[in-house]
Amino acid sequence: MSAHDAVAHDPVFAGGVLAKLEALYPKYPDKRSLLLPALWLVQEARGWISDGSITEVAAKLDLTPAYVRGVVTFYTMYHTHPVGRHFIQVCTTSPCGICGAEDVARALLQHTGCGDLGATSPDGRFTVIETEC
């Protein structure tokens, strides 16, 4: 359990979010097929996917938390910790590096106040990460 989940988990799938999930059931062949859309609903509602949310999604879709966590951590589009309102991804692979990606990343970190790649600015507005395009 992470520090972000030290507080009791407040269920995501209630009210409107639960209704959105249930509306998707007929469009998919089985519950397992709903995993990516369910994770999007969590991230849309909370901004990130906590350990408690992973457990909740697993229970709703009859999956194991380990399976859901594997999917969450495989895809870079899902956030496993709070991020800024503006989530900026900079490719730093060799081809992009030749085109100046390091300078772009450095300028973004300085302009946003994030300080380091992966960090969120003190005002919570920006998170800058490195990625592969």
Image (cartoon, rainbow, N blue to C red):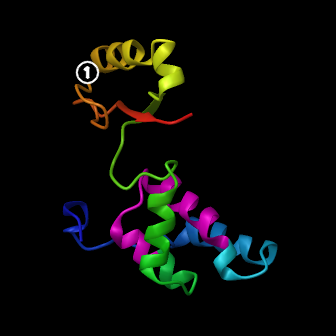
Placement of 79 over or under 128, stated as above or below: below
Residue 10 is drawn in which quadrant? bottom left
In magenta stretch: residue 36: yes
**Residue underneath mark 1:** 113
Q: Quadrant of residue 106?
A: top left
Q: Which residues are magenta?
A: 34-56
Q: Is residue 116 magenta?
A: no
Q: Is residue 10 visible?
A: no
Of helix, strand and loop, which one carries label 1?
Answer: loop
The answer to whether 55 appears left or right of 18 in the picture is: left
- On the rendered structure, is 125 left or right of 28? left
Quadrant (top left/top right/bottom left/bottom right) for the N terminus: bottom left
Specify the farthest residue to the bottom: 62
Foreground of the two, 132 or 65: 132
- Seen at 29% across and 35% down, the residue is 120
Q: Would you say 115 lies left or right of 89 here?
A: left
Residue 97's spot in the image, x, y percent? 46, 19
Q: Residue at x 51, y 21 (%)?
A: 96
Q: Overall secondary structure of the magenta stretch?
A: helix
Quarter of the image where the C terminus is located: top right
